[in-house]
Every structure is written in structure tokens, then in C-alpha cells.
């Protein structure tokens, strides 16, 4: 696993396209964003996802600044933008719609909890990463599937969705590299 990460990080350091993120991005973060990245890193340590969780928090919510997205089915919420439908199912065995539909009250309460309870949101992000890790055993594809689900493994008929998932994984890879290597990274004690 360490060899895979090392080779992926080497690839990123020589110009993989995931925007043009640099260490200077950390200097643009406010105090709360830096705290959010540090908390994400610390929570992820328990399961070996420390850099991944920090990178996902940075990518998905700008390290806690944007904790709600409703342009996708059911929406995604929290620092890690967990899909509401997945969280409802994992936590309560309910879905947003269908015969196992959760009550509107439970849906609202779960949305609020994802946006306000960091540990709850982080727990569900880790559960999602573990779910995909059990299916792929390849961290790059775990990142792709975190964002795109099974689209990360789709064939030619869904090529666009697959490419989008892989672009997401490229971006997470770049962010992991920066979180790990920049001296001003919040997880390394940078100001």
C-alpha cells in the first residue's frame, strides 16, 4: 500500500492535473478551515485514512465552509458531503423515498446532524471509504468511488461518469500530496 501511495504521489508531483493547487492554498484558509482539516486528519488516523479524510474535507466542503449540496438526489451534507440516502440507510435502515422511506422529520434531523456534528459526519465518511475499500483494495479507486459510486468502475456506455470519478480521484491525490508534504499544512502544524 505504501508503494502505491508513493508512486501515486510521485505521479502527482510531476504535474497530474487536479487544478493547480499549491501549498499556498493553506495560507488562504481561515482559522476554522485549518481546524477542520486538522480534525479530519486526527479522526482519519484511527482507520488509516488521515490524509484522505483531510483531502476529502478540503475538496468537498472547502474544509467546512460549504456543508450542503442539493443538486444531487437527496443532497449531500456535512464536511465530507456524505450522501443523505447512504447515511439514512447506514444509520437507520431507511431511504429517502420508496417503501423504506424515512419520515420527513428523520430526514431533516439527519441533514442537520451531518452539518453540525463533525464526528457523525466523519464516521459516515470513513464508513463510505471502508465500503469501497472492501470492494476495490485500491486507494485510487476508493477515492473515485467515494465520489462516483459504481460509476468509477463503469464501462464505455458510461464513460463520462467514469472519467468524472477518476478526475475526482486525481484531485484527491493532489490534495493528499499537499496535505502530506507542505510545511504550512494544518496537519503538520503549519500556522
Image (spheres, rainbow, N blue to C red):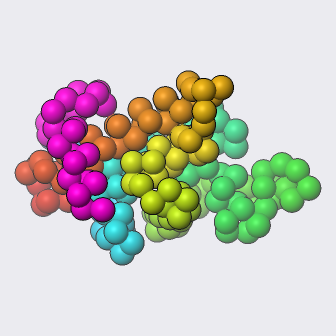
Across the whole image, how many numbered discs are drawn on residues?
A: 0
Relative placement, left or right, of 119 versus 71 is: left
What residue is rendered at 30% in x and 44% in y? 173
Relative placement, left or right, of 184 versus 36 is: left
Q: Is 172 or 154 nearer to us in this picture?
A: 154
In the rendered view, tell whether residue 47 sits above or below residue 109.
below
Q: Is 10 or 96 nearer to us in this picture?
A: 10
* Residue 158: percent from left, percent from top: 63, 28
Relative placement, left or right, of 30 versus 152 is: left
Residue found at the very far left of the displayed protein: 183
Q: Does the magenta stretch include residue 12?
A: yes
Relative placement, left or right, of 102 versus 9 is: right
**Residue 58 visible in the picture:** no
**Residue 154 visible in the picture:** yes
Q: Is 143 or 156 nearer to us in this picture?
A: 156
What residue is rendered at 28% in x and 54% in y? 4
What residue is rendered at 49% in x and 36% in y? 165
* Residue 18: percent from left, percent from top: 31, 31
Residue found at the very far right of the displayed protein: 99
Span highlighted in magenta in the image: 1-24
* Residue 179: percent from left, percent from top: 21, 51
Amino acid at each position: 500500500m505504501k508503494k502505491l501511495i508513493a508512486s501515486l504521489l510521485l505521479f502527482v508531483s510531476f504535474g497530474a492535473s487536479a487544478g493547480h493547487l499549491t501549498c499556498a492554498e493553506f495560507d488562504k484558509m481561515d482559522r476554522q478551515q485549518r481546524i477542520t482539516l486538522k480534525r479530519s486528519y486526527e479522526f482519519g488516523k484511527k482507520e488509516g485514512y488521515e490524509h484522505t479524510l483531510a483531502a476529502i474535507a478540503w475538496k468537498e466542503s472547502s474544509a467546512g465552509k460549504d456543508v450542503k449540496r442539493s443538486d444531487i438526489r437527496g443532497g449531500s451534507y456535512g464536511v465530507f458531503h456524505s450522501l443523505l440516502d447512504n447515511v439514512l440507510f447506514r444509520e437507520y435502515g431507511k431511504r429517502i423515498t420508496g417503501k423504506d422511506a424515512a419520515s420527513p422529520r428523520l430526514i431533516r434531523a439527519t441533514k442537520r446532524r451531518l452539518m453540525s456534528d463533525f464526528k457523525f459526519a466523519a464516521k459516515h465518511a470513513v464508513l463510505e471509504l471502508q465500503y469501497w475499500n472492501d470492494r476495490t483494495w485500491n486507494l485510487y479507486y476508493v477515492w473515485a468511488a467515494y465520489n462516483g459510486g459504481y460509476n468509477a468502475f463503469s464501462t464505455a456506455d458510461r464513460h463520462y461518469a467514469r472519467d468524472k470519478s477518476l478526475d475526482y480521484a486525481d484531485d484527491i491525490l493532489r490534495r493528499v500530496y499537499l496535505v502530506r508534504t507542505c510545511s504550512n499544512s494544518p496537519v503538520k502544524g503549519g500556522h
